[in-house]
Structures are given as structure tokens and as C-alpha cells.
Image: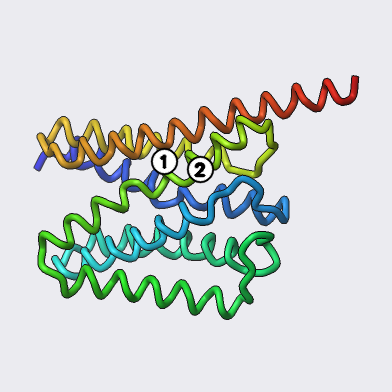
Amino acid sequence: MNPIVEGIGLLGGAFGLFISVPQIVRIIRTKSHVGVSLSSWLIYFLSMSSWSAFGFRYHSPSQIISNTIALSFTGLLSWMLLSENLSTKVKFSKSAALAILLALGAGCFAVVTFSPEPVVNVFLILFLYSRVPQVIESYKSYRSGRQTVVSMPTYALSALSAFTWIVYGILTGLTMIIVASSIVLGLSLLVFIFETLAQKKAQKMDQVGQG
């Protein structure tokens, strides 16, 4: 085990732990979730639930600890988006939102815990595309020139984490990590680009309106 290589892996994991935090802070400050994809964060929440179960199944303390921490932040953000006071499209009471998240999380935990390994692998790979709904939402924001509250630091952290894991995968020769992290990196960069373009377009539209 090369300590430098493993340090790179730990750094990538550290970046990934807190990607939900900037988005949580932005939603609290603005009291809005405009442009933030509920579907993306729900899928990501299910992904973290599944990877936590993966850690328990294979007795991996690092997987258990890191994914449980990420799960707690992602769960909070998903709950906020589902809760009635922050959602205009999908309205649930706070208790109903919590019950939904617990049921979905428990379902994914059970699938990963009790399913055959090939099923588990496919199940986990599908979650790599959790950012696709946000890419679509951000593209719509760009097309319409909509000002959103999507947190740029969230996707910068996501991209940085994925890039670090790509380096780790190259150094360790783990192709699956390279492929998976490349997908996450590409989708995160697309969100970042579309949101940047959407903000610029919204500012130009405001200037034209004021003129």
C-alpha cells in the first residue's frame, strides 16, 4: 500500500463527503430551491444509502463511515426539498417527507444487503447517473435565462472529488474507479457550465429589462 496513493484516495473521499453542504446553506439563506433538481438529490440519497449498505455487507469501515456521513447531509437536503415549506412543485409535510426518505433508504439498503453480487453491482452503477436530472434542469435554466439557487461550490467539489478519484484509479490501475469517476466528473462539469451560462444570460436579460 503506497501511502501517497492512499492519501489521494482519502482526499477524494473527503471532498465528496460535504458536497451537499453548500447547497443546504444556499437553500436556507434564500428560502428557495429554484433550479435545484429534487430527482437528482433523491437518487443521490439512495446511492449513499446503497453504498453504506455495501460497506456493511463487505465489512469496510471506510465505506461505512464516509458514506454514512455523506448520507446524513444528503438526507437533510433531500428532506428540505421534499418538505412543504421549501417546495412549490412537490408538497409534503415534514413528517411525510421523512417517512418517504426512510422507506426509500431502507429499501435500497435491503437490496444491497440481500441481493446477489451481480445485481448489487448493476444497482450501484445505475446510481452514477444521479446528476443527469440536474444536468437537464440546468440546461433548461440556461435556455430560459432563469436565475437559480443551484450551488456552484457543490458541483465544483463534486468535480474535484471525481478528478481526485480518477488520479487514484490511474495510480492503482482500478479501471472501474476511473470509469465511474469520469462519468461523475463529466456530469458535474456540465451542471457547472450550464449554471454559469444561465447566470450570465439572466444578468443580460435583467440589464435589457432595466434599459
- As helix, strand or loop, the secondary structure at mark 1 comes to helix
Looking at the rendered structure, the kind of residue marked 2 is Thr
- Percent across and percent down for residue 17 are 40, 52
- As helix, strand or loop, the secondary structure at mark 2 comes to helix
At a point 28% along the width and 34% down the height, the residue shown is 182
Q: On the rendered image, what quadrant is the N terminus found in?
A: top left
Q: Is residue 37 left or right of residue 31?
A: left
How dense is the environment of label 1, judged by Cα within 10 Å: few (below 14), some, or many (20 and up)? Answer: many
- Quarter assignment of residue 42: bottom left
- Quarter assignment of residue 140: top right
Looking at the rendered structure, the kind of residue marked 1 is Ser
- Percent across and percent down for residue 151 are 58, 42
Name the disc covering residue 158, or none. Answer: 1
- Percent across and percent down for residue 52 are 28, 65
* Mark 1–mark 2 CB contact (< 8 Å): yes
Instruction: List the residue tagged with mark 2.
Output: 154
Q: On the rendered image, what quadrant is the C terminus found in?
A: top right
Q: How many marks?
A: 2
- Quarter assignment of residue 206: top right
At a point 51% along the width and 28% down the height, the residue shown is 193
- The answer to whether residue 190 is above or below residue 90 is above
How dense is the environment of label 2, judged by Cα within 10 Å: few (below 14), some, or many (20 and up)? Answer: many
Foreground residue among 11 and 207: 207
